[in-house]
Image (cartoon, grey):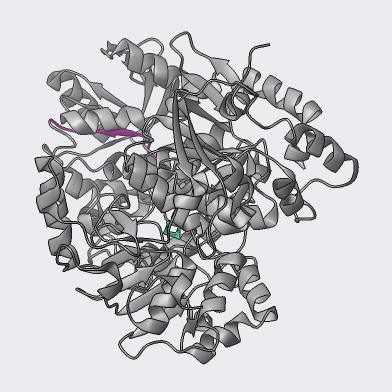
Amino acid sequence: MSTQTLYDKLWQSHVVYEEPNGATLLYIDRHLVHEVTSPQAFEGLKIARRQPWRVKSVLAVPDHNVPTDHRDEGIKDPVSRLQVETLDQNCADFGITEFKMNDQRQGIVHVIGPEQGATLPGMTVVCGDSHTSTHGAFGALAHGIGTSEVEHVLATQCLVQKKSKAMLVKVDGQLGAGVSAKDVALSIIGKIGTAGGTGYAIEFAGSAIRGLSMEGRMTLCNMAIEGGARAGMVAVDETTIDYVKGRPYAPQGEQWDKAVAYWRTLVSDEGARFDAVVELKAGDIQPQVTWGTSPEMVVPVGAKVPDPAAEADPVKRTGMEHALKYMGLQANTPISEIAIDKVFIGSCTNSRIEDLRAAAAVAKGRTVAANVKLAMVVPGSGLVKAQAEAEGLDKVFLDAGFEWRDPGCSMCLAMNADRLEPGERCASTSNRNFEGRQGPGGRTHLVSPAMAAAAAVTGHFVDVRTLA
Amino acid sequence: MEKFVKLTGIAVPLDRPNVDTDAIIPKQFLKSIKRSGFGPNLFDEWRYLDVGEPGKDNSNRPLNPDFVLNQPRYAGASVLLARENFGCGSSREHAPWALEDYGFRAIIAPSFADIFYNNCFKNGMLPIVLDAAIVDQLFRETGNNEGYKLTVDLAAKQVVTPSGQAFPFEVDEFRRHCLLNGLDDIGLTLQHSDKIKAYEERRRQAEPWLFN
Ligand code: SF4
């Protein structure tokens, strides 16, 4: 048998049927659903009088529209409320498991899937959400789909797909202290660009990746989509297996042993061929800060805001000028001199327990700077929140002047009440710094949780390693 | 999508030309995140004497007794008789959704607006073009005979009156094939149901924990 990449293996094991033209019917093991992209899909099923093919493969949760405070008062915005109520109703109608807004297991869909063991190695995982790539951290094939595909998967348990090319992103060496998976993700995107992974499924490998926790791997795979790839993945190892063990949806007993034996095969074979290879040295990676309106507009914290005048490509130059104007920044300003108005620690990129620990370690014994109007911490799920509280992290944040909120997408995309006002500048642990993403006119700088906390307590960007 | 092979049902005559999609389903109902449940608001401005709003309980709104759909003799109609250029105006797919939700499966008219015509097929509804003179005759017969039912036979491509008079109609072959077999994109995939089931069975043996 010829050598195979992890992606080859995951793909091949899910092929139901292949058309002569290469279009493939791919079987879907896990379907995650949230309130924004599912209502019309459920309606489609109802109109066609169809039932979900395998209702137990579906797990639903409201996350985008839920308020992060005063939940007992319900959702005030009628459009948001209607979307959440519609999800509740659809799940009730079809018998789909849903973690409702006030369930402790509720949280951001990409946080709760892995947390529950609903995401397992070797699975295909889809969700009507581009950051579904997150779940690839488990040696799974995971990607986002549109609403019509949501309906298609509900009805048929399959998707019609064409195979992507395979890219290997290899990071070898040891990450420095204060450098996190988020910095690795941003460095990779800075290197390959936001379209660099288009048409590829990316496998992240190398000793630095193997050294990451599952939380870190999820952060990395989460942002594969920002690098243009629909799917990112990491091979299965002991870290993966340890994380999955004992989770509510994980196999047990005899099945567990059988599963683990299979999961251990979910690695790229020695000498497997990739269509593209990108290599980074872990030791070179510094804490990163984005300065523009695309995740690829990123520099190390010790650098300066780039000067468009130094850019030879006229298209890029115009893009940079436009971004600087929107961001209200001057070329050549040291990143550490950029003052901020708000801090957001949360999102499916960085709202897991390890992220909160990293931020709390920085916040501990310090106070949010006077010029920072709001610094909020939004845990990724109710269980993350409970864990953090058990560790006393909430107290650390509250003592430092942060707000401690209820789980949801929150200011990552500002569909609920949490948002930036026009012109406000935010240090954010989310994944997209697009214009208006966190509120119309808002200015987003993507950073790691530790860097966000450091910005909160100093009032400007700062190399977290100098705070020690 | 539901199959459409042959249907016999009460016909209701909507005697107006150029019925636009805003009349079929007024714009205030487009805010809905749904695509079903529009039936009670089909032809809202004609059917009711007050103004309809999303979320309003339609069951106790004052009905317009003059509007044809409100006449008891047409209750449960599944065939809509219409005049020329039915479905003109905005391209909202809510229009066929509303007609379908109300219970219509076939619409007979001398002509249809283009986008609406396409949208019907996507939603399991059959729009049929017949000569204006034939449509006229059907209007007369429907009006004169309570309980008048038409048979719409897609397999034989004809409309048959209670007296057995048959009127052939044209329809695109691929669309006909899809409607006859209930095939939308999902329907096409479901043609491989046996393969999906066989695949599932193999996986259930090899990786039983996926099916817990
Ligand atoms: S946290 Fe942000 S990126 Fe993640 S699912 Fe929610 S809105 Fe999307």
Q: Residue at x 50, y 73 (%)?
A: A378
Q: Is residue A118 above or below residue A53?
A: below
Q: Is residue A66 left or right of residue A432?
A: right
Residue A51 at x, y percent in the picture:
58, 39
Compare residues A223 and A17 and report the one nearer the observer. Answer: A223
Q: Quadrant of ligand 1?
A: bottom left
Q: Quadrant of residue A28?
A: top right
Residue A78 at x, y percent in the picture:
36, 71
**Dividing the image into 4 quarters, which one contains the N terminus of chain A?**
top right
Residue A383 at x, y percent in the picture:
65, 69
Residue B66 at x, y percent in the picture:
21, 53
Compare residues A323 and B84 and report the one nearer the observer. Answer: A323
Q: Quadrant of residue B62?
A: bottom left
Q: Residue at x 40, y 70 (%)?
A: A463
Res A221 visible: yes
Q: Main secondary structure of the magenta part?
A: loop
B81 drawn magenta? yes
Compare residues A444 and A111 and report the one nearer the observer. Answer: A444
Magenta region: B74-84
Q: Quadrant of residue A233?
A: top right
